[in-house]
Image (cartoon, grey):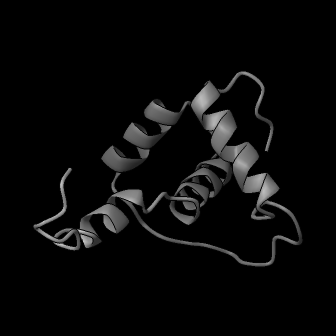
Amino acid sequence: MPTSGRSPRLRELLDQAGEAGLLSGDKAVRVSCRVTSFLMEAATRRSGIRSRTELIEYALSKVALEDDYGDRLLALKGSVPADVEL
């Protein structure tokens, strides 16, 4: 997917997806779904991506690379003993 003219955040995400091997190989999976026009318009406007295929690749890459730091941090709640001096 060409990244020139894209926002730096979008380019970075697509670069990470490429480095992780998520965008290489045969495109053998076909995705078909129905979404509201409001969702499609908002995602297109927000991302600047006009191609539906590229928009879906971007969205799936974002989910695949999502950082789970918040979940891991919350899982630690209560794990520090009360007598530890912070």
In the rendered image, the residue lying farthest to the right is 25
In the rendered image, the residue lying farthest to the left is 82
Q: Residue 72 placed where, x, y %?
A: 36, 67
Q: Looking at this view, is 63 or 42 the one in front?
A: 63
Q: Residue 61 placed where, x, y %?
A: 61, 58
Q: Looking at this view, is 14 or 52 the one in front?
A: 14
Q: Picture quarter containing residue 81?
A: bottom left
Q: In this view, does 3 lie above or below 85?
A: above
Q: Looking at this view, is 8 or 83 the one in front?
A: 83
In the rendered image, the residue lying farthest to the bottom is 29
Q: Residue 22 placed where, x, y %?
A: 75, 64
* Residue appearing at x 79%, y 53% in the figure: 18
Q: Looking at this view, is 7 or 65 the one in front?
A: 65
* Residue appearing at x 58%, y 32% in the figure: 9
The N terminus: image quadrant:
top right
* Residue appearing at x 82%, y 70% in the figure: 27
In the rendered image, the residue lying farthest to the top is 5
Is 42 left, or right, of 75 in this rendering? right
Q: How many marks?
A: 0
Q: In this view, does 34 lie above or below 69?
A: below
Q: Picture quarter containing residue 17?
A: bottom right
Is 63 left, or right, of 5 in this rendering? left
Q: Picture quarter containing residue 48?
A: top right
